[in-house]
């Protein structure tokens, strides 16, 4: 079984961690983040737009502009960052049948996979960006 993030989520997480590590009130440019974290500049601009829309990051234009976290890194969850760029993380397709799960008739493995999914999402929901910095 493969559990992988999309590039978009990978870049979003790396970006938010970089912003969390910045000096308080320092604004980082897309170019700086992209260069320091090996992220394509044009793609990062799209990711930043999603993070701003989700109120995780705030941006300012102009000479002294750039991006910073909109709130403390301890108040931003890993799940929030992932869902800001990917949308709802819940799997909708049956792991065995391949199509949408049926409300009236689920496969034999449905309950196990649904519970596992909820545990994983709960772990991401309760993991703050600040705690990721402590791990690194």
Image (cartoon, helix red, strand yellow):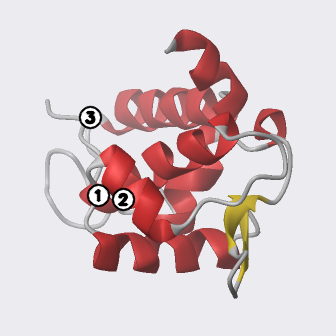
**Residue sticking out furthest to the front:** 63
In the rendered view, tell whether residue 74 sits above or below residue 29: above
In the rendered view, tell whether residue 62 sits above or below residue 92: below
Marker disc for residue 3: none
Identify residue for label 1: 39
Q: Position of residue 80 (x, y in %)?
A: 64, 52
Going from the N terminus, do you reach mark 2 or mark 3 first?
A: 2
In this image, 89 relative to 102: left or right?
A: right
**Distance in Å between CA atoms under marks 2 and 3:** 45 Å
In the rendered view, tell whether residue 121 sits above or below residue 119: below
Marks 2/1 in contact by CB < 8 Å: the verdict is yes
Other residues around mark 1 within 10 Å, as few (<14) / some (14–19) / many (≥20): many
Identify residue for label 2: 34
Tag 3, which secondary structure? loop
Q: Position of residue 65 (x, y in %)?
A: 70, 76
Going from the N terminus, do you reach mark 1 or mark 3 first?
A: 1
The residue at the point 28 percent across, 33 percent down is: 109
Tag 1, which secondary structure? loop
Query: Could you say which is closer to the camera, residue 102 or residue 76?
Result: 76
Residue 106 in view in this figure: no
- Mark nearer the viewer, 2 or 3: 2
The residue at the point 83 percent across, 42 percent down is: 24
**Distance in Å between CA atoms under marks 2 and 1:** 4 Å
Going from the N terminus, do you reach mark 2 or mark 1 first?
A: 2
In the rendered view, tell whether residue 4 sits above or below residue 98: above
In what quadrant of the picture does the N terminus appear? top left
Q: Position of residue 6 (x, y in %)?
A: 27, 55
Marker disc for residue 108: 3
């Amino acid at each position: 079984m493969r559990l992988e993030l999309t590039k978009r989520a990978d870049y979003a997480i790396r970006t938010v961690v970089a912003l969390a590590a910045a000096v308080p009130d320092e604004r980082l440019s897309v170019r700086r983040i992209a260069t320091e974290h090996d992220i394509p500049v044009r793609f990062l601009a799209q990711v930043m737009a999603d993070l701003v829309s989700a109120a995780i990051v705030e941006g300012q234009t102009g000479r002294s502009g750039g991006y910073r976290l909109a709130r403390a890194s301890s108040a931003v969850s890993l799940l929030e960052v992932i869902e800001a760029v990917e949308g709802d993380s819940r799997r909708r397709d049956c792991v065995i049948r391949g199509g949408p799960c049926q409300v009236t008739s689920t496969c034999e493995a449905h309950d196990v996979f649904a519970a596992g999914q909820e545990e994983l999402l709960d772990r991401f929901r309760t993991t703050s960006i600040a705690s990721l910095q402590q791990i690194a």
